[in-house]
Amino acid sequence: MNEKKTMLSGIKPSGDLTLGSYLGPLHHWPKMIEEYDCYFFMADLHAITVRQDPAALRRRTLEQLAQYIACGLDPDKCTLFIQSHVRQHAELGWVLNCYAMFGELSRMTQFKDKSAKNADNINGGLFTYPSLMAADILLYQPDFVPVGEDQKQHVELTRNIVQRFNGVYGDVFKVPEPYIPKVGARIMSLTNPAAKMSKSETEDTGRVTLMDDPGAIMKQFKRAITDSDTERCVRYDPDNKPGVANLMTIYSTVTGKTYAEIEQEFDGQGYGKFKPAVGEAVVEILRPIREETQRLLSDKSYLEGVYRAGADKASHAAEKTLRKVYKKIGFVAR
Ligand code: AQP
């Protein structure tokens, strides 16, 4: 019998993975595969709530799988799959739509943000994606779900759905716990520290992607926003110096140094030394990931083997939950 706790997480292939995707969720995952029974997926069903170019979506989904592996997710030690390959996600998503309330879906920050950004395409999927997200989670009955601060709302909605569903049908679903990593939880744009570094903001010059070469990365860091005060010292003060604080969070997460150690290291040196130092640290952490991703992408049959085996394993686990749900709600068994 498997005694390990289960955890699950996914990222939408809605854009090229960024330094935010890496330092937020992705770099925490390899540590977890030893301890937990982990499921990681490419959330392509979620990506289409915003129009995607089909060829780009296909490319990014495979690239994301290669990046997961390159970041240390050994496919022999965890389950890696493409969301649309496991049809139970869409099926349970529909069921849970019927247990998610209009009011609570309307309050989702992501719905409000994405509707504002895509005013010409406020589709039903954009509104009901939290039910699909609840299905993603509940199919695997995980003990916890690692998420960024901005995703906590989704796990809370999932918990509401679980309580509502279990209240009617008994203990069908386990109530999931959100887990938010302390450092590096939210990486902001290098040119606008008030906005999250996002995959889909292609116009945003403040973005670093995992496939950027060293020259491109250094360029981005050299033009990163710091602050305009006369002090020009490296000090962690998110309220008054958000750009510097963001760079310090990046540097701290990449090097493992504390904020006090970073302040000490750049004491009296202004930003001229600090910004390239952060850039160099990022170049070095991303270099092996980029190189390994490129190598894996040249071996399509290996990647195919990984996502097929992942889909089989995930479907097996998901089907158990779905069958139980269908029975409880009164669907006739096939
Ligand atoms: N900049 C970030 N810093 C820290 N964590 C981040 N995440 C995303 N960007 C950062 C975390 O990544 C997980 C999966 O993200 P997602 O792709 O499902 O959704 P998202 O948060 O909507 O990501 P993007 O990059 O902003 O995508 P688009 O631009 O398509 O909307 C989440 O846990 C998220 O917190």
Image: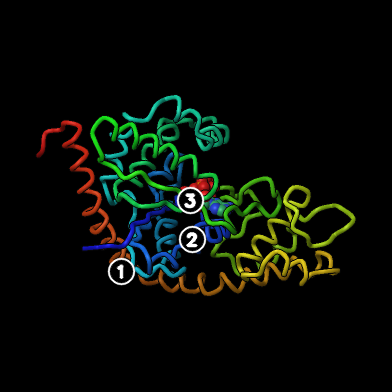
x and y percentages locating residue 59 in the rendered image? 42, 57
Q: Residues within 10 Å of mark 2 (few under 14, many from 20)?
A: many
Label total for image:
3
* Outermost residue, left side: 334
Give the quadrant of the C terminus.
top left
Three-letter code for the amino acid on which mark 2 is drawn: Leu
- Whether the residue under disc 3 has CB within 8 Å of ligand 1: yes
**Percent from the top left, x then y, of residue 256?**
61, 70
Q: Residues within 10 Å of mark 1 (few under 14, many from 20)?
A: few
Report the Cα–Cα distance between label 3 and label 2: 10 Å
Q: Is residue 84 visible?
A: yes
- The residue sitting at 11% across, 33% down in the picture is 332
Disc 1 element: helix
Crowd band around label 3 with a 10 angstrom C-alpha radius: few (<14), some (14–19), many (20+): many
User: Which amino acid lies under the numbered mark 1 shown in the image of this protein?
Assistant: Ser
**Earlier residue among tags 1 and 2:** 2
Q: Quadrant of residue 275?
A: bottom right
Q: What residue do we see at 77% from left, 56% from top?
A: 226
Disc 2 residue: CB within 8 Å of ligand 1: yes
Residues under labels 1 and 3: Cα distance?
A: 31 Å
**Residue mark closest to the camera, 1 vs 3:** 3
Tag 3 residue: 147
At horizontal 64% and vertical 52% (from top left) the residue drawn is: 188
* Residue 14, visible in the rendered structure: no
Residue, disc 1:
301
Dividing the picture into quadrants, the one containing residue 98 is: top left
Query: Residue at label 2?
Result: 26
Q: Residue at x 35, y 60 (%)?
A: 38
Q: Which comes sooner in the sequence, label 1 or label 3?
A: 3
Could you say which is closer to the camera, residue 239 or residue 228? 239
Q: Quadrant of the N terminus?
A: bottom left
Check whether the beta carbons of the residues at disc 1 and disc 2 lie within 8 A of each other: no
